[in-house]
């Protein structure tokens, strides 16, 4: 099993008044789609799985190794979270793509490849002229695709994707899922996806589901 999480218990919502316990797993080449109504704790689950937010109990595993045995930075380099509104750093688009390689957990294993970065940008329909553009001037859809390129460059094993195409038009959305599908064909890779659009699933193969509805417990 590529990725799993057992009895993850966490709080969410106003004042952390809601509590939920979930388990799930993900095989290589598979997408786990997290479903549930607005406010069900889907985005919070991705943050917990990325170890950006603590949980009350439970444990995550990557290739059978517990997250308790792994520094958070190493975990996040392999189990990589992309927020619905990704962070943009000062500087150009190129500067933003280089940014993850400043982290020891990344730069100790791989080097920034500008040729690959430009090829991925082209695949995601990001114009080559954006390379030297101030990243803070990008549209929401361009930022979403920039974050995806940035994630792919560090070669994670698991992507945690929170509404990744919410800001994309139809053409860009198709390009995104084409790139994701291609990436999933690589060795031992998988994704956890939050999406409100069932049409997105037509682009994906080997999909399983985790429904958060009716899982709340008393906090």
Image (spheres, rainbow, N blue to C red):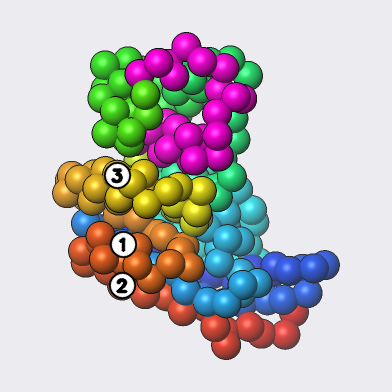
Q: Please report the bounds of the magenta region as a residue range.
A: 128-152
In the image, residue 13 lies at what x, y percent?
A: 73, 69
- Is residue 61 visible from the viewing direction of this image? yes
Q: Residue at horizontal 21%, vertical 56%?
A: 29
Q: CA distance from mark 1 to mark 2?
A: 6 Å
In the image, is residue 135 part of the stretch drawn in magenta? yes
43 to 164, vertically: above or below: below
Assign a secondary structure to mark 3: helix
Q: Would you identify the image quadrant in which residue 193 lies?
A: bottom left
Q: CA distance from mark 1 to mark 3?
A: 17 Å
Pointers 1 and 2 in contact (CB under 8 A)? yes
In the image, residue 90 lies at what x, y percent?
A: 63, 19
In the image, is residue 217 part of the stretch drawn in magenta? no
Give the labeled residue for mark 3.
175
Q: Residues within 10 Å of mark 1 (few under 14, many from 20)?
A: many
Q: Residue at horizontal 48%, vertical 68%?
A: 196
In the image, residue 214 lies at what x, y percent?
A: 57, 88
Quadrant housing the C terminus: bottom right
Give the labeled residue for mark 1.
31
């Amino acid at each position: 099993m590529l990725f799993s999480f057992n009895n993850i218990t966490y709080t969410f919502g106003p004042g952390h008044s809601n509590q939920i316990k979930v388990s799930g797993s993900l095989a290589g080449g598979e997408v786990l789609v997290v479903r549930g109504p607005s406010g069900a704790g889907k985005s919070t689950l991705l943050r917990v799985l990325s170890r950006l937010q603590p949980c009350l109990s439970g444990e995550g595993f990557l290739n059978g190794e517990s997250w308790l045995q792994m520094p958070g930075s190493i975990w996040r380099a392999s189990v990589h979270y992309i927020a619905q509104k990704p962070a943009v750093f000062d500087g150009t688009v190129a500067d933003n793509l280089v940014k993850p390689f400043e982290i020891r957990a990344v730069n100790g294993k791989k080097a920034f490849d500008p040729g690959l970065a430009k090829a991925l940008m082209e695949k995601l329909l990001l114009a080559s002229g954006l390379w030297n553009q101030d990243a803070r001037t990008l549209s929401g859809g361009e930022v979403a695709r920039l974050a995806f390129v940035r994630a792919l460059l560090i070669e994670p094993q698991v992507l945690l994707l929170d509404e990744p195409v919410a800001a994309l038009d139809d053409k860009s959305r198709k390009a995104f899922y084409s790139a994701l599908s291609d990436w999933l064909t690589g060795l031992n890779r998988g994704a956890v996806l939050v999406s409100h659009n069932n049409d997105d699933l037509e682009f994906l193969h080997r999909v399983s589901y985790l429904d958060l509805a009716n899982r709340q417990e008393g906090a």
